[in-house]
Amino acid sequence: MNQRESANQPKVLRLETMPLDCGERVVVVELDCTPGKAWAKALKRVLVSTDGLESVRPRCDGRFVYIIGVDPTLRGYAHRIHHALAAANERCPAPDNSGVALPTPSRAPAWSAASPSPGS
C-alpha cells in the first residue's frame, strides 16, 4: 500500500438502497474519494461485528461501496451502515503528515536568519 492510498479518508456523499430479486437489498454508498485497501478491510471487519449486518458482503468499486445482502426488515440499517463507515475511518486513521511541509536545514529558505539584513 502506498502513502497516498493510506491517506484517503472517504466521506459519504450519498447512500441509496435498491431491492434485489432475492428479497434482500443492496446499499450503494458514494464516497468523495477512492478508499484504500486498508479502509476497505476495516469496513469489512466493522460490518461483521455490527448487529444485523454480520452476513452482508461489501464490495468497493472506485468511489462506490456496494453493501450486498441487507435484510429489508432490519430497522435502522442505514443508520447502522453510517456508523460502520465512520468506524472504518476511525480504525484506519490518516497518517500524520503535519511535519512534511516544514523546511529542513538542507532546504532552508534564502532569507533565513543566516542572511544579512538589507539595512546593515
Image (cartoon, helix red, strand yellow):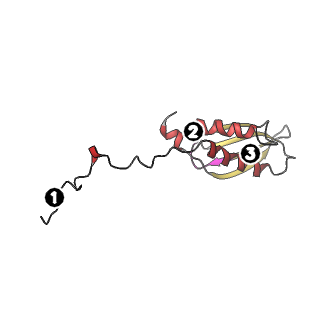
Quarter in which the C terminus is drawn: bottom left
Q: Amino acid at mark 2?
A: Gly
Instruction: Return the residue nearer the eye: 20 or 77.
Output: 77
**Do labels 3 and 1 touch, CB within 8 Å?**
no
The residue pinned by badge 1 equals 116
| Element under disc 2 | loop
Q: Which residues are magenta?
A: 29-36
| Element under disc 3 | strand
Q: Residue furthest left?
A: 120
Q: Amino acid at mark 3?
A: Val
Decide: few, some or many residues near mark 3? Use Cα within 10 Å; few <14, some 14-19, many ≥20: many
Badge nearest the viewer, 1 or 2: 1
Q: Is residue 87 left or right of residue 49?
A: left
The residue pinned by badge 3 equals 27
Instruction: Return the residue nearer the eye: 32 or 89.
Output: 89
The residue pinned by badge 2 equals 36
- Total marks shown come to 3
**Do labels 1 and 2 touch, CB within 8 Å?**
no
Q: Amino acid at mark 1?
A: Pro
Q: Going from the N terminus, do you reach mark 1 or mark 2 first?
A: 2
Residue 58 at x, y = what percent? 71, 37
Residue 46, by quadrant, is: top right
